[in-house]
Amino acid sequence: MDNMINGFTAGSYKDRNTNFQYSRERERGSEVQPFTDLELQAVPEKDRRWSWVEIDRGAIQHNVMVTRKLLGERCRLMAVVKADAYGHGAVEVAKIAISAGASFLGVATIDEGIQLRDAGLREPILLLAEPPVESVPLLLHYHIIPSVYTPDFAINYAEIADAHNMKAPYHLAINTGMNRIGVRFDQVIEFLSQVSFHRALDLQGCFTHFATADAPETLDFQIQINRFVESMRALEAAGINPGIVHCDNSAAIYRFPKTHFDMARLGISLYGYQPANDTHRIVQLRPAMSVFARITNVIQVPMSEGVSYGMNYRSPGSVKICTVPVGYADGLIRLLSGQIKFAYQDRAVNQVGNICMDQCMFEVDIRSRANQRTLDPQIGDLVQIAGPNAMVDTSIDTMAKKAATIQHEVTIGFSHRMPRYYV
Ligand SMILES: *Cc1c(COP(=O)(O)O)cnc(C)c1O
């Protein structure tokens, strides 16, 4: 008895543990009863951790349909579903977008393309980059169309295709001034004449990408569009069919109706975000992503005690501090610590203290006020972390603005760890 510590017999740490376990079992005089698969499967996914992402199918359908209407009958719509559909789930979004009128899919990597094919999608897929030549067998096997701009890739691609009695379809990427990828606009004819000897090569489209389609100042945009038109005229003069001509991203689709050509590439606005400050006058979009959580802890913190790492928030005393299991590993940008609001029972509550990796805190004012219901937060209560809300600005637009970034980066961030539900 004299060498008991916290109810354990003192000894080496290891011995203590083993003795503890075995002695408890012996006390009960029974064997461990393992859980059945059924019992394990019965744990709802939503109750493994109280935070999740909801994707509004209707919103994605709406965004495709209003955009289709603006584009008209003769212009195709490409759903850009790269980066797991900006965090919304590539396969689901691709299916929804196609059912609503998209007819082309855009990806950034071969694996993103393969994922769509494995899910049974049969629409044309454009890889918005030129991949390493080693990847050509995958392109051809999975019918993923590459963007091409180096003669070296073009010729290798054609030769591998030819050796398998296949065609080598591609879209020509043209650099009109963004200076990221592409054949320079005034070298398009030269490029094509360098590779045209190869019979397998099949030019199915020509495109460029705008660097400033969302900017109020349109001079740089004008230069790019003029250069693009110039390169298309050069093709025409040379008797070369450019295939599907396309250049518009979301911002250009709404701001520059004259640049639609044969196809438009809808990215951020497919997910419901205004791509520029002035586009809300042209198109009504519906954000598809929301992030929700349930409260996992509620405490009243004495006045002036700190909350979270760094303690740069101090309790004013009249608040309850609530914890939710959403952190920067889930995409809640740490830079936004203390800068954002959540929606709790239709009221705005301030996120307070530094956002941690897996959790963060918010405060609920518990003082009673005239004509306002006093809040009484409980463990398990629902909180909206991000996304459209009629009462509180929890919008991803505001988050992006406050974090000095674009909506793309915010939605992509929310993709990593939380389960996603389509509603
Ligand atoms: C990502 C991407 C798009 C989509 O841009 P948004 O601004 O999100 O609409 C279009 N075209 C290319 C080449 C892209 O890389």
Image (tube, rainbow, N blue to C red):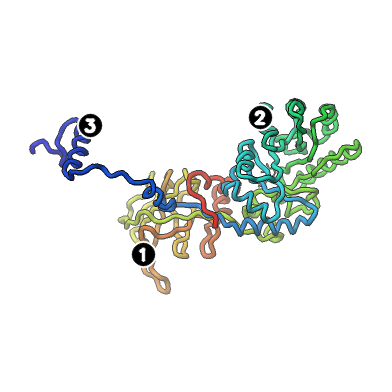
**Image x and y of residue 308, in percent:** 38, 47
| Residue type highlighted by circle 3 | Lys
Q: SS for tag 1? A: loop
| Residue type highlighted by circle 1 | Asp
| Residue type highlighted by circle 2 | Ser
Q: Residue at x 68, y 56 (%)?
A: 100
Residue named by callout 3: 14
Residue named by callout 1: 376
Q: CA distance from mark 3 to mark 1?
A: 45 Å
Judged left or right of residue 409, residue 381 is left
Q: Residue at x 71, y 36 (%)?
A: 146
Picture disc at residue 180: none
Name the front one of labels 3 and 2.
Answer: 2
State whether residue 50 appears in this view: no
Q: Residue at x 78, y 42 (%)?
A: 224
Mark 2 Cβ and ligand 1 under 8 Å apart: no
Q: Nearer the viewer, residue 87 or 343?
A: 87
Question: Tags 3 and 1 in contact by the CB under 8 Å rule?
Answer: no
**Image x and y of residue 65, in percent:** 69, 58
Q: SS for tag 2? A: helix
Q: Residue furthest bottom?
A: 371
Point out the image quarter for the N terminus: top left
Judged left or right of residue 384, residue 19 is left
